[in-house]
Amino acid sequence: MCVMLSLLLHAEDHSVAEEAAWRRLMQQALEEITQGKLPEAEATGNRALSIARTFGPRDLGLADTWDVLGDVYHEWKRCPQARASYMRALTILQSQPMPNSLYISHVAASFISGLCECGDLKAAQTAFRTYEPELMRNPGDALNQSQVLTFKATLASRLKKLDQAESLLREDIALLGQLPEDQQLRIALDRANLAAALERAGHHGDSLTEAQAAIDFFEKNAPRNPSLVAALNNASCALLNLGRRAESERTFERALQAATDLYGEDNEVPARIMLNYAYLLRKDKQTRLAAAWQKRGSEVLRRSVLGETARVDVELLQAAMH
């Protein structure tokens, strides 16, 4: 997540009015990301980008703006746009006469995390090797250390090293709990990811505990945060695997509604929730209901792929069927 370090770092000769307008838009975009208002955050970020481009092609404010847009697309699960935005930010940062390793490490961590979440593990591992010097250069910076732990946990989870992922996430939760400033949002994000790792490892009771803790926080403090969708989905899976069918169905409906509200009807995230639920229903011998959700999820996924690329990604659709 962008921390707007460039507000402290860059001191170019911009007009006072331009600088003030850009700062206001950047702060607004960050608030909209936190509130889950992603279309609004994209629009605000692009308005900031229009101003930042007048600062010059190597200005740190322009890098900061691309970083914020990367965060928008990361949360929105729009992987190509997130990757392109982070890369533009990193290119500017590395072109500086005296590159700031701390700022590079923050952007690189978001970039690598996005690659992991989008399933591009090879690219994530390559990026980690590329940016490892910056990531490891600031061991005294607790938030930087937290980002590295989160990335490693995401990668471990994707590689099905679930015990390692659990250990790293618990280490990060403990680290964040020791910081003087409030880190409850980051802790809730970790708990949502921990719930997913525990569920995949077959620890359904522990998964439900972590998912519910995350849900409680998000519903009270950040009801449009994308991780609420993930936490609800994980809780639904855990409940079904624990034999609590009625609770699972209610939680699934909440997850699907939250995903639809946040991403829209024809989006891959609601589609994946439907298809995941269909898979669990088949395991639970609820064949007819599973088939209905499989059909609906596949149709939504097809429309979402058409909307993103104007063509059907056959491999993606085939993968969804298994």
Image (cartoon, grey):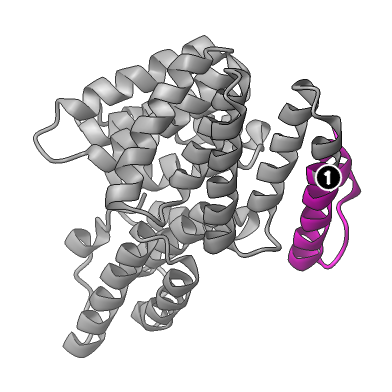
Residue at 79% across / 29% down in the picture?
Answer: 286
Alpha-carbon neighbours of circle 1 within 10 Å: few (<14), some, or many (≥20)?
Answer: few
Residue extending farthest front? 246
Does any portion of residue 90 appear in the rendered image?
Answer: yes
The stretch in magenta equals: 293-322
Residue at 42% across / 70% down in the picture?
Answer: 41
Query: Against 273, is 302 above or below?
Result: below
Quarter of the figure with residue 134: top left
Question: Front-most of 109 and 153?
Answer: 153
> What secondary structure is marked by label 1?
helix
Circle 1: residue type? Ala
Question: Front-most of 210 and 287?
Answer: 287
Query: Against 14, is 75 above or below?
Result: above
Residue at 41% across / 52% down in the picture?
Answer: 225
Residue 285 spot, x, y in % from top left: 81, 23
Residue 45 spot, x, y in % from top left: 42, 73
